[in-house]
Image (cartoon, grey):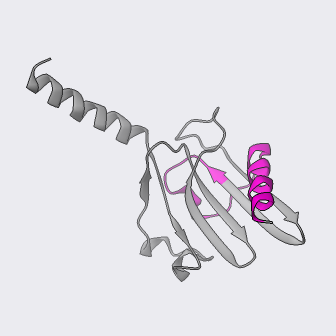
Amino acid sequence: MNMKGAILFTVLAGLVSTGLAIQCYVCTSDDDMACNDPFESFTMTKQTCYGANSCTKTAVLDQITRSCGYGNSTVSVGSSDGECITAKILGIKATSCTCYLDGCNSANLPKLSAFAAATLVAAFTALF
């Protein structure tokens, strides 16, 4: 492959991967009060999450964390499906939501997910 072909391939590969990446809000209310609820998305910039297929929002006690995620592998980026799970572990209530649209972790989502529950339980088990 000549130099022009290699450059063209690199540019096209970059465009394809950019098109498949989801954009999420990434913050924690411990570091930025604008991350808290009610969420002030106008003060935040969405980040491109290469390799991720979802956005997440987790609330534990008074802390909100919004981030890139690796949700249900059968749901593709751009799907309107979303899920939330609330669990009480060691008396601490935690809610974790996963969604699949750009910037979708700015609010709560309505459904429950076994994957989200398992992730939440694993995280709490590791912490406690």
Percent position of residue 13, x then y: 30, 32
- The percent coordinates of residue 120 (x first, y second) are 76, 56
Number of marks in the image?
Answer: 0
Farthest-out residue, top: 1
Residue 16 occupies which quadrant of the picture? top left
- The quarter of the picture where the C terminus appears is bottom right
Residue situated furthest bottom in the rendering: 33
Quarter of the picture containing the N terminus is: top left
> Is residue 114 in the magenta section?
yes
Question: Horizontal placement of 78 versus 74: left or right?
Answer: left
Residue 106: x %, y % from top left: 57, 64
**Residue in the picture at 58% in, 40% down:** 79
- Left or right: residue 7 versus residue 98 is left
**Residue 56 higher or lower than 5, as above or below:** below
Q: Is residue 120 magenta?
A: yes
Q: Nearer the viewer, residue 10 or 74?
A: 10
Taking the spot 63% from the left edge, 61% from the top edge, the residue there is 57
- Outermost residue toward the right in this view: 91
Q: Residue at x 62, y 50 (%)?
A: 99
User: Left or right: 28 with respect to 21?
Assistant: right
- Snapshot quadrant of residue 70: top right
Residues shaded magenta: 98-127
Q: Is residue 61 visible?
A: yes
Work out whether residue 112 can be spotted.
Answer: no
Q: Position of residue 4 (x, y in %)?
A: 9, 26
